Amino acid sequence: MDILIVAGFLGSGKTTLVLSVIGSLIERTDRKIVVIVNDFGTVGIDGSLMTKYGLEVMELASGCVCCTLGPDLLQTVKDIEEKLGPDMIVVEPTGVADPQAIIKVLEHYKPSGPLRFQSAVVVDASRFDVILKALGPPMTAQVRAADIIVLNKMDTVPEGELRRMEAVLRTINADVPIIPISAVQGTNVERFVEAVIGR
């Protein structure tokens, strides 16, 4: 089973990204996917998407996916595997959660088959400098832990600014793809799907 953690600060576009790629992931891989969210009511997954793809969305019992939530998250993943048997679980944690801390929690889970982790961090290009200044250490931890960095809202900043942001992100994590996208407009979203499938 694969577990994809889609992290990023509040307002970065995590939910929009998950909603924009889930159908493509299911269509291209023919895999059963379950999404774990903090608050199902605020996610806005439309019923036709769920019906068309047989998508299951689970709300974490305590309402918070974060690094301090070991037992609840482990139990939720165990319940999902036993009841639904997915090929992939997509976890959308709270904004300040460190993907590496979540992976460490989930490494205690012993599934029936192999377990593979991926983490994508969504960075808001429109608030890049503000977030880096105000939340430098947690942002750096998220970027350092990422297997894929998504620079979202590329439509809101000039090309030169995107390149500068990519250069800053490369100083933190030089070894992973950085994919500029606009989740709202759908620009480069398929590049993210390719990166997830190809890892």
Image: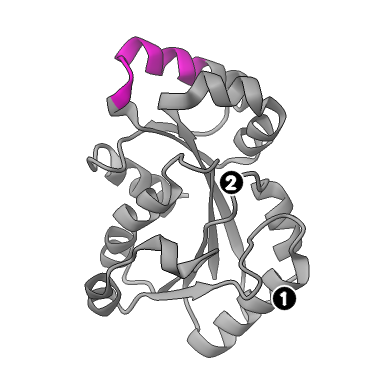
Between marks 2 and 1, how big is the CA–CA gap?
27 Å
- The nearer-to-camera label among 2 and 1 is 2
State the colouring used for the structure image. one colour
Q: Position of residue 86 (x, y in %)?
A: 47, 77
Quadrant of the rendered structure where residue 180 is?
top left
Task: Please indicate whether residue 159 sits to the left or right of residue 139 in the image.
Answer: left
Query: At x 63% / y 60%, what residue is drawn?
Result: 65
* Residue carrying label 2: 95
Image quarter of residue 131: top right
Amino acid on which the number 1 mark rests in the picture: Lys
Q: Residue at x 31, y 24 (%)?
A: 156
Q: Name the image quarter holding the N terminus.
A: bottom right
User: Magenta stretch: residue 192 in it?
Assistant: no
Total numbered circles: 2
* 102 relative to 33 in the view: left or right: right
**Does dot 2 land on a helix, a strand or a loop?**
loop
x and y percentages locating residue 159 in the rendered image: 31, 15
Q: Is residue 107 visible?
A: no
Q: In the image as oriented, which residue stretches furthest toward the bottom?
A: 83
Image spot of residue 105 (x, y percent): 75, 61
Q: Is residue 15 visible?
A: yes
Secondary structure beneath label 1:
loop
In magenta, the rendered stretch is 156-167
Q: Is residue 31 above or below residue 83?
A: above
Identify the disc placed on residue 110. Answer: 1
Residue shown at the point (61%, 28%) measured from the top left: 173
Residue 188, compared with residue 29, is above or below; it is: above
Q: How many neighbours does mark 2 have within 10 angstroms: few (below 14), some (14-19), or many (20 or more)?
A: many
| Foreground of the two, 156 or 28 | 156
Q: Is residue 124 above or below residue 190?
A: above
